[in-house]
Amino acid sequence: MGKDSEFYKGKKKAQTIRLRELLIQLPPCAVDYIHSKEVTSQVSTLVQYSYDLITFFTFMKDQNLVFRNKDPKEISVDLISKISPEDILEYQRYLELNVDRNHYHENGKKAIARKMSPLRGMFKFLLVYKKIKENPMELVPLPRLKKDKNIIRMNAAEVQSMMNTAEYGAGTMSDRQRKFAEKTKFRDVAILTLMLNTGIRVSECNGLDLNDVDLNANTLTIVRKGGAQDLLYFGDPVHDAISDYLELERKGIQVREGHEKAMFLSLQGKRISVDAIENLVKKYAKIAVPNKIITPHKLRSTYGTALYRETGDIRLVADVLGHENINTTIDYYAAIEDEHKRQARNAVDYKKMNKDQ
C-alpha cells in the first residue's frame, strides 16, 4: 500500500539500476558529486542530473580541443579544472539551439536553467572539497526567468464541457474515436473526476492501487513527488465515479499477471501509464476546450485555483497539493491575488458611504 506497494518498490529499483548504468559513463569526480546528493535527492532526480552531466561531457568531447575524443568516464579532475567560463557559455549556446546533420534540439530559458543546475552544483562541490581552485560557473549568469502569472486553468463551464465529452462523447468525434471512448468511458471519467477534485499529479494517479482507495471513508493514499506518503479526502463525485468504474468496467477486464493490484487499467489489462493518462486528458480537452492547451498539470492548476477561490486559505491549498514550500503555492496562485486587487477598485464608494451615514 502506498510507498510500500510492489509498484513503487519496482519503480525505485528500476530507477536505481538506471542510475548505476549512467554513473559508469561519468568522470569519477562527477560520480562523487552525484553520491553526495543521495541523502537529499530522489533517485529520479539523480538520474536526470546524470543525464545532464553526460550531455555536458559529451559536448566537451565533441566540441572542445582539450577534451577531444576523450572518454568522459576517464576525464580527470585536473582536466576539468581547465574548463573556462567561455567553455560553459559555449555549452549554454549549444543547449539553446543546435543544428547539424545528426542532431537538432532547441531549449527555452527554463529548460536551459534546469540542465545547467547539476553542472553548477558539480563545480561548487569540487570547489568546496578543494578539487579545483576556481569555479568557472561563478562568472556564468543563468538565464533570467520571468514569473508567469498567466497560469492556464479551466473555468467551471470548461470543466463541465470536458466531463460531458468524456461521458457522452462529442459530435466532432470520429466513429473510431467514439467506439474506443465507449470502451474506456467509466475509467476516463473516474480519472478526470479524481484529478479535478483532488489535484493529484499524473504520477500519483498512475501509481494508485486498489487498496489505496477507501470508498467507505472516502480517502485516498498517494505517494507524493518526493516519495512521502499522504492521505487525501474526496467527496461524492469522486466516490461515485470510482464506484462506477470498478463495478461497470474494471470487472470485465482480463488483468495481466503482475497488474492485479493496479486501480486504473489499460484495455490490455496493464496498469495505465503516465503517457496514457496524459493522452486521454489531451484528447478530451482538445474537443471540449480547443482554445487552451490542457495537460494533467493544468487539471491540478484548475483544482488548486478553485479551492483557493472557495476557501481563501493558501496554506490549505499548499497542504492539499503537497507543496513542501508554501512559496511555491503563493507564486503559483499569484494571479488570483491579482483578481482580488482588481475587485478592490470598486469596493469603496465614499459618496455612497456618505449618503448612508
Image: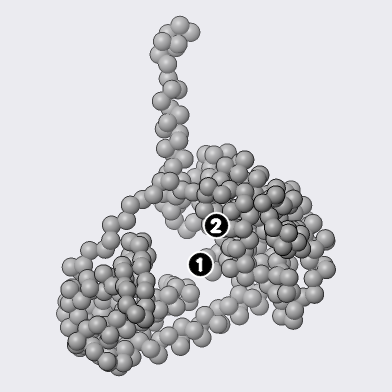
> Are the residues at dot 1 and dot 2 in contact (C-beta closer than 8 Å)?
no
Q: Which residue is mark 2?
A: 295
Disc number at residue 93?
none
Query: Neighbour class for label 1 at 10 Å: few (<14), some, many (≥20)?
Result: some
**Res. 1 visible in picture:** no
Q: CA distance from mark 1 to mark 2?
A: 21 Å
In the displayed structure, 285 sits above or below 35; it is: above
Query: Neighbour class for label 2 at 10 Å: few (<14), some, many (≥20)?
Result: many
Taking depth in this image into account, of 320 and 62 the one nearest to the observer is: 62
Quadrant the N terminus occupies? bottom right
Element on which disc 1 rests? loop
Residue at the (31%, 92%) spot, across then down: 71
**Residue type highlighted by circle 1:** Gly
Q: Which residue is mark 1?
A: 226
Where is residue 275 drawn, in percent x and y?
58, 68
Q: Quadrant of residue 72?
A: bottom left
Q: Quadrant of residue 181?
A: bottom right
Give the mark count: 2
**Residue type highlighted by circle 2:** Thr
Residue at the (70%, 60%) spot, across then down: 177
